[in-house]
Image (cartoon, helix red, strand yellow):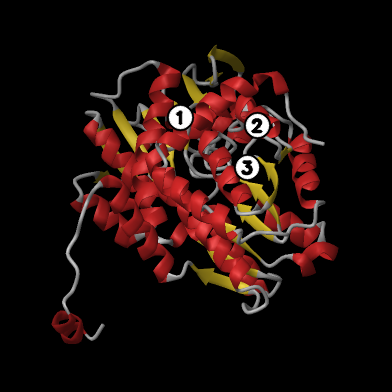
Amino acid sequence: MSTIRDINQAPEGEKKIAWVERNMPLCRSIGEEFERTKPFAGLKVALSVHLEAKTAYLCRVMAKGGAEMHITGSNPLSTQDDVAAALVAGGLEVHAFHGCTPEEYDANIDKVLSCGPNIIIDDGGDLVHRMHTVYKDLLPGVIGSCEETTTGIIRLHQMERAGTLRFPAVTVNDADCKHLFDNRYGTGQSVWDGIMRTTNLIVAGKDVVVAGYGWCGKGVAMRAKGLGARVTVTEVDPVRAIEAVMDGFRVMPMAEAAKIGDIFCTVTGCERVITEEHFPLLKDGAILTNAGHFNVEVDMEALEKSAVRKYEARHNIEGYELPNGKTVFAIAEGRLVNLASGDGHPAEIMDMSFAIQALSARYLAENKGKLAPGVYAVPREIDQNVAQRKLDTMGVAIDTLTQEQREYLGV
């Protein structure tokens, strides 16, 4: 029995899924292949990914391969209720709804994991973490997991170092066809889609501060520059800081950047990046946003405590009046701005990311019992396969090495 808001919203959700299906030809071809080969026949798949149309289509691709799908969202504000309804109307089990409380969020995870999953598809590590702490008795049935994002991979490596990871976990986010495109071009576009849609303000001429210059930060900074903003980057890694400088951006500590920023976007995967130390330094009207997985990069708890008044300035924007008389604004409660305030990454980008997810899940199914517990990279052949198939769908041809060239290179 699914747990959703309103099954009557299914027709609207179906339109969204049909639209992304049209624009995800790579996943569509994988779904056709899965329908013939049934790689997940007899297997239960627990999935926790931001539940919008592209994710819904991944769920249907997995189901075509014979998977019994048990689905929840990975963020209380990113679930789209009409999409969840469409999945349920199509016969899949879903436990997710927009705006759930922390307790309801955990309860939905519990409902998904109680099925006794064989494969886990995770975004942020909540399923894997709860599996190891609450559902230890079901761990022997888990073949492995696939992790979608940097934050989840950090948690997996922590578990591996501690010796507590009990099954193989594939780091989907680290695949070239994921982070080079999803993190850079996907986050770069979807963050500004979310900010502009929510604020209805211009970006050109503003000072934008991007915290973190990993692949996501690179994309956010690049798109802000393209929109006409003056961009400042904050970093803790000296190599990435040099890279940002040579890419043409100003680099400085957050204590200095806080004084000049009009719009802030944190993309570090860490906590307390903008804190009570920085709030008094912010300009009146500064806008705080986050594109890291959890709502801990902007210290929202400290912001709530410091404010003398909080109010809804606009839908999904909260105003915080500070003791010094300035007012700052936070979008989507400090949660993922591109999903909590938008539709997430473009369909063509998620076509590649979810192709990696689907093929990595098949890799786990095919290698059941052969992989020891631990963290595993996506096999290179999967990355290459996805890249070539994506080029094919785009009508792009490339050269191939001759035998002589292969011998010269030692391939």
Crowding at mark 1 (Cα within 10 Å: few <14, some 14-19, many 20+): some
Q: Residue at x 53, y 34 (%)?
A: 53
Q: Quick check: 82 above or below 35?
A: above
In three-dimensional space, the C-alpha distance between marks 2 and 3, rounded to whole angstroms, equals 13 Å
Q: Quadrant of the C terminus?
A: bottom left
Dot 2 amino acid type: Ala
Q: Secondary structure at mark 3?
A: loop
* N-terminal-most mark, 1 or 2: 1
| Badge number at residue 63 | none
Circle 1/circle 2 CB separation < 8 Å: no
Q: Quadrant of residue 296?
A: top right
Q: Out of 288 and 224, give the one closest to the viewer.
A: 224
Mark 3 crowd level (few <14, some 14–19, many ≥20, 10 Å Cα): many
The image's mark for residue 74 is: 3
Q: Is residue 102 above or below residue 114?
A: above
Residue at the location (79% across, 59% down)? Answer: 133
- Percent x, y for residue 99? 67, 27
Q: Which residue is mark 1?
A: 19
SS state under label 1? helix
How far across and down, in percent of the image, does residue 240 sit? 32, 57
Q: Secondary structure at mark 2?
A: helix
Reading the image, the residue beneath label 2 is 84
Q: Residue at x 65, y 34 (%)?
A: 87
Marks 2 & 3, CB-CB < 8 Å contact: no
* Residue nearest the viewer, comparing 162 with 400: 400
Q: Amino acid at mark 3?
A: Ser
Apparent side of residue 35 relative to residue 258 in the rendered image (left or right) = right
Q: Are marks 3 and 1 in contact (CB under 8 Å)?
A: no
Residue at point 63% right, 72% down?
160
